[in-house]
Image (cartoon, rainbow, N blue to C red):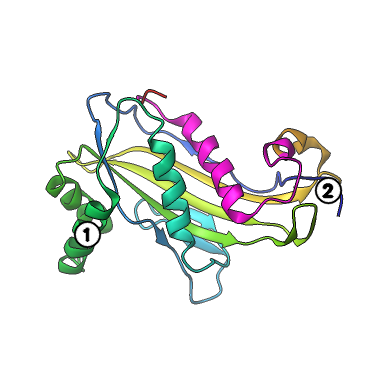
Amino acid sequence: LGLVVFAPDTLQAQEETKPVDKTLTRLAVIPFQAVILEDGSSTAQCPICGSVNSSGSIVRGSEKIVEEIFTDKLKDLKNVEIISSERAAGVYQRISADSLKQPLSRIIQKVGNELHAAVVAVGFVYRFRERVGYDYSAERPASVAFEIHLISVKDGSTLWRDIYDKTQKSLMEDVLQAPSFFKGGAKWVTARELTKIGINDLFKTFSGFEH
């Protein structure tokens, strides 16, 4: 199918509401969630902020892949103490089961307080479509869309949020996106590889954390 590049017609929105205080070093990552739509809609709403995002098919277990890549990237930060994912998941599951009628933002605050965390990270996967084909010959490209929030445990406010929405396209389809093409190693990437590229891009918008 020729040389490949990433699509320009997809959204990569970056939004910061306030800088992260450098004293907020204890960070918990609660289980990322797949936002699965039953009505066949092409858009999904963020469970926290209500933003409307492009959606699509989601490979089973993909939310764990996005969470894993995000958590691994957090380890590159110098002023962050990451609370065990297993511990954070256990506390989240218990509190969410006991707080079914409460908004997710309130549940996140409760989890953070019990874990003595200053910041809680949570992510939502709206689309995770795997590549069909091989590195240099693909019938269908990988496509991912996910959103990540950093929430202050103290007041429940959003310290940072970012969205990554990308579908890979051939270089012939879009010669203007050649730089993105080289990020993928000049090949058709898998959904996991595309997610890793996305997480690296999102971390460029972090404020208040030392890389």
**At 55% across and 48% down in the image, what residue appears?**
195
* Viewport quadrant of the N terminus: bottom right
- Asked which quadrant contains residue 128, the reply is bottom right
**At 63% across and 62% down in the image, what residue appears?**
130
Residue 55 or residue 65, whichever sits in front: 65
Q: Position of residue 67 (x, y in %)?
A: 41, 51
Please give the residue where the numbered disc 2 appears in the rendered image: 173
Highlighted range, magenta: 181-208
- Asked if the magenta segment contains residue 211, the reply would be no
Q: Callout 1: helix, strand or loop?
A: helix
- Asked which quadrant contains residue 117, the reply is top left
Q: Callout 2: helix, strand or loop?
A: loop
Which label sits in the foreground, 2 or 1? 1
- Asked if the magenta segment contains residue 200, the reply would be yes
Q: CA distance from mark 2 to mark 1?
A: 46 Å
Q: Is residue 74 left or right of residue 134?
A: left
Q: Look at label 2 and name its amino acid.
A: Glu
Q: Which mark is residue 21?
A: none
Q: Position of residue 87 (x, y in %)?
A: 22, 53
Please give the residue where the numbered disc 1 appears in the rendered image: 90
- Asked which quadrant contains residue 41, the reply is bottom right
**At 79% across and 36% down in the image, what residue appears?**
176
Q: Look at label 1 and name its amino acid.
A: Gly
- Up-down: is 78 above or below 168? above
Q: Is residue 108 left or right of residue 193?
A: left
* Viewport quadrant of the C terminus: top left
Residue 51 in view, yes or no? no
How many numbered marks are there? 2
Earlier residue among tags 2 and 1: 1
Is the magenta region chiefly helix, strand or loop? helix
- Up-down: is 165 above or below 210? below
